[in-house]
């Protein structure tokens, strides 16, 4: 009989572990799909049915020879390289955009020497075409050459008539199915001055990861007139979020613990129950019931479109946290407080020196839960602040998604970037959260 019970317990434990592992894996699927989608290009993201893993991103290396142009002098050579590199970089992204191109490298050679190199990712070139340089102009030779110097300065290049250290795999030159197509449009449609020698195709998921640099630059481009966003990009939206989180945690820990201290140690039992019931009942009123009056009140107080509009709502007690602190304070032995009062400690001294030190696990639960709540909060910040420089991350992502020129892979990438700090915090403080649940009496 005993052996059957032990065997049954082992089977139950094994099944529980398997089901937990499967459930955790299922929970991770949306997150993994988010990161996977952020590594797709602006065409792969719209494929139906969607693919979980993106196709291997390609880097196209284009080689043009300038032996004949070099005879005209360095100034003419440099001018030809600037123009041809601009034509090659942008045309490749748009002419073979269905081939999964994520990066374009341009090599200018004189004989066997590489004298010029320019590289750019697809996302950067698209931003230049849409926002920074060409202002949504059609991709053709005339439009590209109209602002080629500005493009060269933006993309960057390396030039040395004596030869660069940069090189390419000559054994793979032209050994790909795209080489002929690239040569046709560069020679016939864009009429480059250099002699087309071929192309090199490389595949690596590293090129997709480099796209995140483009995601990072996008807010700087879209909000160039907002000094702080133009300077710090996503960090500024993150700083706004962290400001609200820090204020909310400080406010909730202070207000809720003080309220719980009063209910646990200062009021009589009957009065404490009535007050706690009132606080808990207030939390049952849905936000939509008082949203409009609260918004009108904040408007009249002049708190809209300011940080205070996001901060002040956290200066109210949260019933669950008060209940959590009170439950912990009630478990502490009364002799501890009596001894402190005999030693002459005031009520505030008891609160700061005894209660708050002993309730660190509960405070960890309150802090992490508050942080998650503020991080996920969207509607109130969206309602109360309209200025871009005040947006927290959630509101910034939503407003960026309204831009018709932003593709879904950009939105996925920006969402992935915004999740990284949260994942780090939850991972680092997961042990504190577990201990807090145990000490506060929460089962789970």
Image (spheres, grey):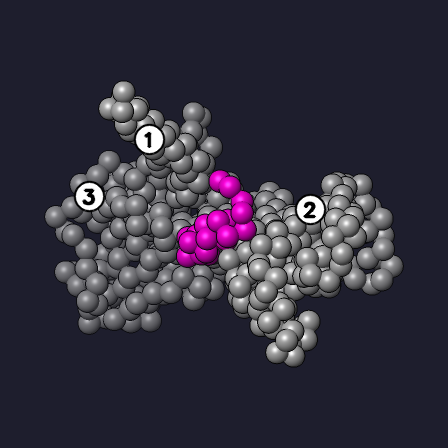
Which residue is labeled 1 in the image?
A: 13
Q: In this picture, which residue range is highlighted in magenta?
A: 424-444
Which residue is labeled 2 in the image?
A: 379
Across the whole image, how many numbered discs are drawn on residues?
3
Which is in the foreground here, disc 3 or disc 1?
A: 1
- Would you say 262 lies left or right of 121 here? right
Q: Is residue 374 visible?
A: no
Q: Main secondary structure of the magenta part?
A: helix
Depth order, front residue of 180/270:
270
Depth order, front residue of 86/190:
86
How far apart, in angstroms, are the residues tagged by discs 2 and 1? 42 Å
Q: Earlier in the sequence, mark 3 or mark 2?
A: 3
Check the image and name the residue furthest to the right. 300
Residue 193 figure quarter: bottom left
Q: Residue at x 35, y 43 (%)?
A: 101
Q: Is residue 378 visible?
A: yes
Q: Residue at x 50, y 49 (%)?
A: 437
Q: Residue at x 46, y 56 (%)?
A: 432
């Amino acid at each position: 009989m005993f052996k059957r019970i032990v065997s049954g317990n082992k089977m139950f434990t094994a099944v529980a572990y398997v089901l937990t592992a499967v459930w955790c894996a299922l929970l991770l699927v949306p997150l993994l799909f988010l990161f996977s989608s952020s590594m797709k290009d602006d065409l792969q993201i719209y494929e139906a049915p969607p693919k979980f893993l993106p196709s291997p991103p390609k880097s196209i290396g284009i080689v043009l020879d300038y032996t004949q142009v070099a005879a005209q002098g360095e100034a003419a050579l440099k001018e030809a390289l600037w123009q041809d590199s601009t034509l090659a970089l942008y045309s490749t992204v748009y002419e073979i955009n269905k081939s999964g191109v994520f990066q374009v490298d341009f090599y200018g050679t004189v004989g066997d020497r590489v004298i010029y190199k320019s590289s750019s990712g697809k996302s950067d070139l698209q931003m230049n075409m849409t926002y920074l340089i060409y202002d949504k102009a059609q991709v053709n030779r005339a439009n590209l050459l109209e602002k080629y110097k500005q493009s060269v300065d933006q993309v960057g290049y390396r030039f040395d008539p004596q030869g660069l250290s940069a090189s390419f795999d000559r054994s793979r030159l032209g050994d790909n199915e795209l080489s002929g197509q690239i040569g046709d449009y560069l020679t016939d449609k864009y009429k480059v001055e250099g002699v087309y020698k071929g192309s090199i195709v490389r595949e690596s998921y590293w090129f997709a990861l480099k796209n995140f640099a483009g995601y990072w630059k996008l807010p700087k481009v879209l909000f160039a007139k907002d000094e702080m966003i133009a300077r710090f990009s996503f960090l500024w939206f993150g700083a706004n979020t962290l400001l609200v989180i820090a204020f909310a945690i400080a406010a909730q820990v202070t207000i809720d613990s003080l309220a719980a201290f009063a209910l646990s140690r200062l009021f009589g039992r009957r009065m404490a129950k009535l007050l706690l019931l009132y606080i808990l009942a207030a939390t049952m009123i849905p936000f939509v019931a008082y949203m409009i009056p609260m918004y009108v009140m904040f408007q009249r107080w002049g708190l809209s479109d300011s940080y205070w509009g996001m901060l002040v709502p956290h200066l109210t007690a949260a019933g669950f946290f008060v209940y959590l602190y009170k439950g912990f304070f009630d478990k502490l032995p009364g002799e501890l407080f009596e001894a402190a009062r005999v030693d002459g400690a005031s009520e505030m001294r008891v609160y700061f020196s005894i209660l708050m030190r002993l309730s660190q696990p509960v405070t960890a639960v309150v802090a992490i839960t508050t942080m998650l709540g503020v991080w996920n909060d969207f509607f109130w910040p969206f309602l109360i602040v309209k200025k871009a420089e005040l947006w927290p991350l959630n509101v910034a992502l939503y407003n960026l998604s309204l831009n018709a020129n932003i593709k879904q892979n950009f939105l996925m990438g920006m969402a992935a970037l915004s999740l990284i700090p949260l994942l780090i915090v939850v991972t680092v403080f997961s042990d504190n959260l577990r201990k807090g649940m145990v000490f506060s009496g929460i089962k789970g």
